[in-house]
Image (cartoon, helix red, strand yellow):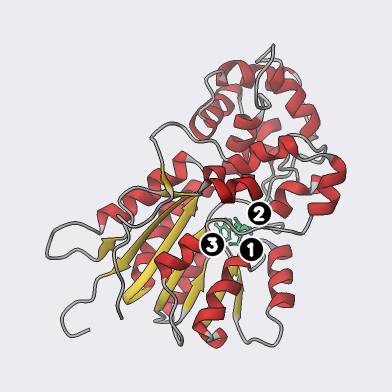
Amino acid sequence: MKHTNKNDQNNSQTSSNKLSLDSSTEHLISVSQSEQRLTTGIHLPVLVTEVLSYLNPQKGESYLDLTAGYGGHATKILERTLQPQEAVLVDRDHNAIDALKQRFAGDRVELIHDDFASAAGRLLNQGRQFDIILADLGVSSPHLDSASRGFSVRLDGPLDMRMDQTQSLTAADIVNTYSAGELADLIRRFGEEPRANRIARLIEAHRPITTTAQLAHIVAKAWPGHSKQHPAVRTFQALRIAVNDELGILSRALPLWIRLLAPGGRLAVISFHSLEDRLVKQALQAEAGDRYDAQLQLLTKQPVMAGDIELVSNPRARSAKLRAAVKIKKKGE
Ligand SMILES: C[S@@+](CC[C@H](N)C(=O)[O-])C[C@H]1O[C@@H](n2cnc3c(N)ncnc32)[C@H](O)[C@@H]1O
């Protein structure tokens, strides 16, 4: 199958190396309570044109979506492969799986409710391979727009933040049981928060903390004065990453995804903050390069970002970074 390297072709922006916070969290700042009710249940997929361009789906190809969410990308890809029975859609969130069941009812797609590292391990054990693999990391708009899921800095709800509702660890467990030192470490590492020590001491002094509004208010005390974004955004990002072990699962999963690619198969990964993007970049680069045993050819030297037109209609795309690679066909494959 023909696949061209599009490094020089794309007209999207490329990223700088500066810290990028997950704009899906910042986006909440502009979502009012009434807008929130209207948008709940809607997730606009990001970088759709770019994803289709790099994954280049062809009729009859097999497809693995590791973060199928509400099926926006999957619908576009399946419109091209026309092969739903060769598609596996994974998500660790029950609501997403229920929505996918409805969206693809009668299409015979395979749905897996699991995290994408465990799902990939299972598929490898079954000897499966895929022509197209997509991972669109992070949370979906319904996560952020629903107060009861506890992800939002702006909407008051329980301190939950679990993507998988069957998991036992919640953000409340971390906030109320970790030592100030452990909290500071987590907030610094996963939130890249310069005032992590002060925030951790404030949290410790105000426990028990049970709601997102309480936590947001307490963290804001560490940042008096005016700021463009809510001062608790970085702390919320850190807690979300910790609750869902986002970086641990991603580092375990990336090598498995590369193994699941069929010769000539394409992998695209969209990340939303710099910690994730670094892991994706390292994993792809580790298997690429000008050497005899390279497994991948990179299709994006720099991450591809959304253009201005998409940003107007979908602010969540602001921090999205897409990296893609193709599995090299070896002689005889
Ligand atoms: C950005 S949304 C994906 C949206 C999807 N591409 C669409 O078009 O609707 C990310 C999804 O990935 C899921 N997710 C995040 N981390 C995951 C993991 N480690 N394993 C499985 N699913 C995960 C979330 O539950 C969420 O539904």
Residue 316 in picture, x, y percent from top left: 62, 46
How far apart marks 1 and 2 lie (CA) works out to 7 Å
Task: Return the disc, 3 or 2, that comes first in the chain's sequence.
Answer: 3
Q: Is mark 1 within 8 Å of ligand 1?
A: yes
Question: Taking the image as four quarters, which one is ligand 1 found in?
Answer: bottom right
Q: Amino acid at mark 1?
A: Gly
Q: Which residue is mark 1?
A: 69
Q: Residue at x 24, y 66 (%)?
A: 295
Label 3 or label 2, whichever lies nearer to me, is 3
How far apart marks 3 and 2 lie (CA) works out to 15 Å
Q: Quadrant of residue 1?
A: bottom left
Q: Residue at x 73, y 40 (%)?
A: 152
| Placement of 293 over or under 316, stated as above or below | below
Task: Return the disc, 1 or 2, that comes first in the chain's sequence.
Answer: 1
Residue 206 in picture, x, y percent from top left: 76, 20
Q: Which residue is mark 2?
A: 140
The reply to whether callout 3 and callout 2 are in contact (CB within 8 Å) is no
Q: Is mark 2 within 8 Å of ligand 1?
A: yes
Q: Residue at x 57, y 67 (%)?
A: 73
Task: Farthest residue to the right: give it.
Answer: 34
Q: Is residue 213 left or right of residue 60?
A: right
How far apart marks 1 and 3 lie (CA) works out to 14 Å
Q: Which residue is mark 3?
A: 48
